[in-house]
């Protein structure tokens, strides 16, 4: 079994982006700038956003972090997005999800200018991705593609089972893996909560992408010998032995499954790191040179 080391791969890619930024600065070109909006106090979201902003600093990007209270109204949030859309200093905008219940996610995503939609969640970005046109591809699936590419994993003709059909991971992942590209050219089965006999489908899979948000859901009896397993889950499990009171586990029962795999991503240090890396790459692509 070989570990797909998201930490190592993302560090290598981020070093390349940092180098590009440094060159841009020497040439007097614009510094890429990411604006992140966090509404409410969800602890996991706070950690993710802090990590995105910290990465911006590490690679020489500018960043703006707007923290808004849980009670922020939808019109207030939309007004902040409109201001960021109009600000030429800001190249990329992300609104961390999930949002409080009184705010319609769809309205918020639609309000971000597609030219600054570095999360790739806007219908225009998703539509362009499905058509294979240049666009921002959402960070988690894009990060997974970068990881498969980095390890030179041959995906052509493989059967890939994606578990979870979210707009931000499962659905775009299924499209990217099935299109005529490298990595890609897989035969994809997109599974979800109504799928019958998930285990039988997983046992046919050469590649499993687990994105269901349930700790240790994919167990060793569901995995074919030699399969490639990509774990998108980042679940917090109570653990009194930790200072934080929790530990992170994926959607895959790593210890048992790892023994059967050819490749597997760890949690933490796998897909999560690649998500941030892909987001930074999108932000660099978003910069418009005059
Ligand atoms: N919530 C979970 N994943 C993501 C992501 O990639 N971007 C944003 N904005 N919110 C998320």
Image (cartoon, helix red, strand yellow):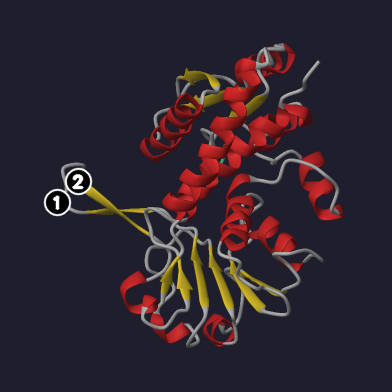
Q: Residues within 10 Å of mark 1 (few under 14, many from 20)?
A: few
At numbered mark 2, what does the secondary structure look like: helix, strand or loop?
loop
The answer to whether the residue bearing label 2 lies less than 8 angstroms from the nearest atom of ligand 1 is: no
- Where is residue 151? Give x, y as percent: 55, 64
Instruction: Name the residue at 64% across, 51% down.
Output: 142
- Where is residue 102? Give x, y as percent: 56, 31
Q: Quadrant of residue 34?
A: top right
Instruction: Name the residue at 58% across, 51% down.
Output: 143
Disc number placed over residue 139 in the picture, else none: none
Residue behind mark 2: 245
Q: From the viewer's perspective, is residue 172 above or below residue 118?
A: below
At numbered mark 1, what does the secondary structure look like: helix, strand or loop?
loop
The residue lying toward the viewer, choosing from 233 and 224, is 224
Q: From the viewer's perspective, is residue 51 above or below residue 238?
A: above
Residue behind mark 1: 240
Q: Quadrant of residue 252?
A: bottom left
Q: Quadrant of residue 217?
A: bottom left
Instruction: Name the residue at 68% across, 58% down.
Output: 171
Q: Quadrant of the C terminus?
A: top right
């Amino acid at each position: 079994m070989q570990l797909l080391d998201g930490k190592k791969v993302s560090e290598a890619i981020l070093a390349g982006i940092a180098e590009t930024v440094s060159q841009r600065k020497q040439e007097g070109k614009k510094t890429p700038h990411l604006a992140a909006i966090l509404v409410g106090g969800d602890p996991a979201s706070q950690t993710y956003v802090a990590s995105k902003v910290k990465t911006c600093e590490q690679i020489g990007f500018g960043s703006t972090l707007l923290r808004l209270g849980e009670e922020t109204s939808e019109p207030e949030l939309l007004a902040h997005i409109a201001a960021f859309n109009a600000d030429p200093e800001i190249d990329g905008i992300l609104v961390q999800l999930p949002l409080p219940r009184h705010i319609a996610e769809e309205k918020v995503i639609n309000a971000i200018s597609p030219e600054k939609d570095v999360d790739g969640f806007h219908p225009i970005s998703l539509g362009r991705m499905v058509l294979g046109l240049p666009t921002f591809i959402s960070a988690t699936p894009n990060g997974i593609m970068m990881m498969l590419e980095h390890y030179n994993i041959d995906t052509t003709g493989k059967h890939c089972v994606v578990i979870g059909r979210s707009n931000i991971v499962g659905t775009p992942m299924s499209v990217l893996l099935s299109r005529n590209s490298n990595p890609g050219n897989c035969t994809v089965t997109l599974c979800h909560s109504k799928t019958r006999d998930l285990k039988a489908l997983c046992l046919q899979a050469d590649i499993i992408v687990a994105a269901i948000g349930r700790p240790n859901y994919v167990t060793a009896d569901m995995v074919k010998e030699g399969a490639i397993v990509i774990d998108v889950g980042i679940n917090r499990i109570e653990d009194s032995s930790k200072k934080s009171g929790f530990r992170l586990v994926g959607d895959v029962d790593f210890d048992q499954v790892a023994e059967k795999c050819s490749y597997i991503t760890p949690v933490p240090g796998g897909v999560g790191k690649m998500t941030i890396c892909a987001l930074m790459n999108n932000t660099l692509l978003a910069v418009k040179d005059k």
